[in-house]
Image: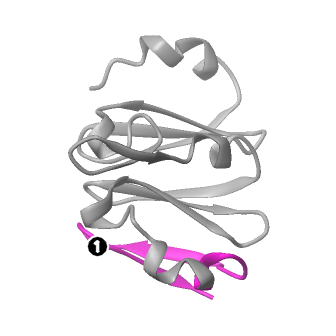
Amino acid sequence: GADSSSVASDLTSGVENITATWQAFAALKEDGSVVTWGTSAYGGDGSVFTSGPVSSVVSDLSSGVVKVYSNRWAFAAVKTDGSVVTWGDKRYGADSSSVASDLTSGVEDITATCQAFAALK
């Protein structure tokens, strides 16, 4: 497993669920925040990644998350307002920019294949 020592203090209480990609983990906490760890290219540092971090979504994961989903390479989170945040390898689901306007509200559920996500509104 991935080394969680850098976030160990964040995982001592309040963890509701943990989901994983091949080399990273995301823990959803009771307060609606998400703690990530593991390999950056797989979402371990909360960034969208292509040969190096492109952008970070860490601030978007600090509150309001109700569910986290994963595929082999990326994560997707639904927030209380029905918006979606994605991170990990941008080739496999982390880059949701082409449908960003559809993911700002009203998403009820997400399903994943090994390399993509689909949102249900």
At which x and y percent is residue 116? 31, 72
Which residue lies at the image location 66% right of the left edge and 42% below the top edge? 59
At which x and y percent is residue 55? 46, 48
The residue indicated by pointer 1 is 113
Which residue lies at the image location 75% right of the left edge and 45% below the top edge? 63
Say what secondary structure mark 1 lies in: loop
Above or below for 4 versus 104: above
Q: Is residue 96 or residue 42 the one in the foreground?
A: 96
Instruction: Determine which quarter of the picture holds residue 27.
Output: top right
Above or below for 71 versus 108: above
**Image position of 89 (left or right of 94):** left
The stretch in magenta equals 102-121
State which quarter of the image contains the C terminus: bottom right
Neighbour tally class for label 1: few under 14, some 14-19, many 20 plus, Cα within 10 Å = few
Which residue lies at the image location 43% right of the left edge and 44% below the top edge? 47
**118 within the magenta span:** yes
Above or below for 27 versus 14: below
Identify the colour scheme used: one colour
The three-letter code of the residue at mark 1 reads Thr
**Image position of 87 (left or right of 13):** left
